[in-house]
Amino acid sequence: MSFFVNRFLKGKWFAKSNSILSNKNKVLLVIATLRNYMKAGGLKKVRKDLVLLTDYVSDIIHGRYHEYNKSSIILALAGLIYVVSPLDVIPDFLPLGFLDDITIITWAIAKIAGELTKYSQWKSTLITHPSKSDDIEEVPYEIID
């Protein structure tokens, strides 16, 4: 296991994740902050992974996705908190400052890969089979001049 992952596991990230998980506004603030961070050049390598993690956490927090494992969302949120935290192992303003963030996100994705596969399958069913409420109903109309 890498130095960064060991530091992550020994840090406050899981406790912080667990403590804010019940506060929807705090979780959404982490997600919004992370979406701003994703614009940073150093995170381009894990952009797709970050989008997957933020969507996963967001769908759970909004009550859309229910088939999740609590330890997986805690790990996903801990990784996201780590990325947005200014107090991680390598400050982001330094050269290679995103190296630790990339390592943690890559590791977190690998740890909960099965969970994220289930989530991705669920999400793809929404796209291919929208609910009736998403259908547009045709209504007869006439134009009156």
Image: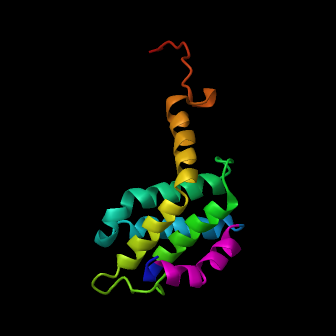
119 w.r.t. 31: above or below? above
Q: Residue at x 47, y 84 (%)?
A: 88
Of the pair 123 and 131, the residue shown nearer to us: 123
55 w.r.t. 9: above or below? above
Q: Residue at x 41, y 75 (%)?
A: 101
Q: Quadrant of the C terminus?
A: top left
Magenta region, residue range: 5-21
Q: Residue at x 39, y 86 (%)?
A: 90
Image coordinates of residue 94 in percent, x first then y, are 31, 87
Image coordinates of residue 108 in percent, x first then y, are 50, 66
Residue 98 visible in the shown view: no
Image coordinates of residue 9 in percent, x first then y, are 56, 79
Q: Quadrant of residue 12?
A: bottom right
Q: Is residue 9 magenta?
A: yes
| Main secondary structure of the magenta stretch | helix
Q: Is residue 136 magenta?
A: no
Colouring style? rainbow
Image coordinates of residue 3 in percent, x first then y, are 44, 83
Residue with the most extreme right position: 22
Q: Residue at x 67, y 56 (%)?
A: 69
Residue 41 visible in the shown view: yes
Q: Is residue 72 left or right of residue 104?
A: right
12 w.r.t. 34: above or below? below
